[in-house]
Image: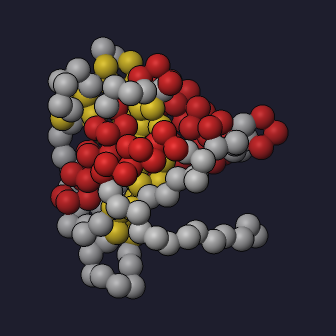
Amino acid sequence: MLRPPRLPASEDVNDAVLIRPVAPADHAGWKPLWDGYNAFYGRSGPTALPDEVSRTTWARFHDPAEPVHALVAERDGVLLGLAHYLFHRSTIQLEPSCYLQDLFTAPAARGQGVGHALIEHVYERAKAAHSPRVYWQTHETNATAMRLYDQLAEKSGFVVYRRLL
């Protein structure tokens, strides 16, 4: 099973933002962040994700058999950001790879280190799972996020191809 060990919640460098695993009681705070993330990538209105996808995604975070995980950033009881990541097998290594699938910070919290802290905590979870790498992708127009990503990782040089079926 590709499930990392449980790690406790921890504080980021400014001790004002708590990064922790999402809890079932967080749904009301998580859902607006999830909706904001999807809207950012054009998945809103007529192109919105079906509710079933969001419900299933939420349920996966709380299913111990699933390799999909979620962290949230919280300050004073308010959720400011999310990071969803998953572990998967690879043909080029024995240990699982960690894919940071979704990262989003509430607009009011941007520039405060929330995204940075979420990524660092995904790194911690990956290390605990003995994963030798964390990787992610972003849209080429997401220049603001790429300024952060350039500080925390290296560009792989790979181009993503896909075909929707």
Give the colour scheme of this rendering: secondary structure
Viewer-nearest residue: 45 or 70: 45
Viewer-nearest residue: 87 or 58: 87
The image shows residue 43 at horizontal and vertical percentages of: 69, 42
Height in image: 73 above or below 116?
above
Viewer-nearest residue: 136 or 83: 136
Which residue in the rendered view is the most extreme toward the right?
Answer: 46
Specify the quadrant of the image occupied by residue 130: bottom left
Which quarter of the figure is the N terminus placed in?
bottom left
The image shows residue 117 at horizontal and vertical percentages of: 28, 38
- Residue at (60% x, 47% y) in the render: 141
- Residue at (71% x, 71% y) in the render: 163
- Residue at (20% x, 60% y) in the render: 127
User: Can you see residue 70?
Assistant: no
Height in image: 105 above or below 124?
above
The image shows residue 150 at horizontal and vertical percentages of: 37, 51
